[in-house]
Image (spheres, helix red, strand yellow):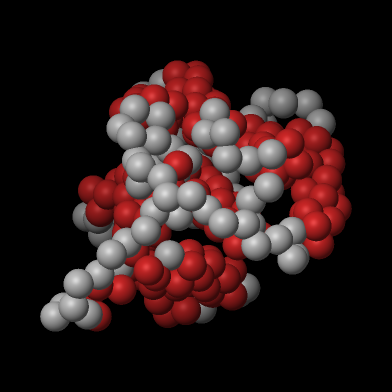
Amino acid sequence: MMRNKELLLLLIRLFLGYIFFSAGICKLTGGNFGQVIGPPWLEEALSKYGLGLFAQVVAISQVLCGMLLLSQRFSLLGAIMLVPMNIAILSVTVSMKWAGTPYVNTVFLFLNLLLLGMEHHKFRFLLQANQACQITPAATDRIGQNLFSWLGMGFSLLTITVAPFNLLLTYIFALLALGAFALTIVRSGLAKKLDIALLMLPFAAMVFVTLGKQLPYATWLLGGVILSEALLLPYRLYLGRDRHQVVEPTTAVLG
């Protein structure tokens, strides 16, 4: 069983990863892809001021940040890249006085910074320039060290490529990417059955959100997934509250 901190770390990565992955793809498809945040009309609105290319860069950047977080292999890089984006989005929503949106973006920024705080040992050498600093791999670093992580990123890049032109292929590649990212967690061998269930439920939610416009009763299915996660997670955290496992050093193997 993973430590509570490790489980929460993975869940936050998955949450933020899909939020921004789907937001970027939704913009590239003109609002025809399942999304949690928007606005999908960003490119259309900015094109009036000659900023259509800028809107596309924002959308692609969101997908790339989400992809890196979901990959687990490069999740720290994704979390670092996401900070300036979150700050920029928060600044825009505050400046334009969007009701409620700044509070949502503040939560995203807080979770983003929390991710970095949970992995601060990996870059604290930046503050200790004149001292030797040894970085010990965390248990969660084993996740993503396989072929499925690379496959997920490959399918994500294909999703970006076809998103402006073919909606069907966009859905296919996006779902294949999510499936590969799910397998990279399952095949890591790190998580036990309850942890696997808690980590796979978010992927089920991603599928229901992605196919929300095409899948009957998607809202009800999504509600069931959220309820299951809400009931199981406190129980799992209670079980792991006093668990202090000794993590054996691991060596990252490129897959």
Q: Is residue 159 above or below residue 190?
A: above
Where residue 47 sits in the image (x, y, percent)? Answer: 29, 51
Asked whether 242 or 37 is in front, the reply is 242
Asked whether 170 or 180 is in front, the reply is 180
Q: Quadrant of the C terminus?
A: top left
Total residue callouts:
0
Where residue 19 sits in the image (x, y, percent)? Answer: 53, 51
Q: Residue at x 42, y 50 (%)?
A: 249
Kindly give the residue lying farthest to the left in the view shown: 130
Q: Is residue 122 above or below residue 13?
A: below
Where residue 236 sits in the image (x, y, percent)? Answer: 78, 54
Relative to 205, is 24 on the left or the right?
left
Visible in this render: residue 146?
A: yes
Where residue 36 sits in the image (x, y, percent)? Answer: 59, 50
Relative to 206, is 198 on the left or the right?
right
Asked whether 38 or 176 is in front, the reply is 176
Visible in this render: residue 209?
A: no
Relative to 156, is 8 on the left or the right?
right
Q: Residue at x 25, y 70 (%)?
A: 133
Q: Residue at x 57, y 40 (%)?
A: 190
Q: Residue at x 76, y 41 (%)?
A: 194
Asked whether 63 or 167 is in front, the reply is 63
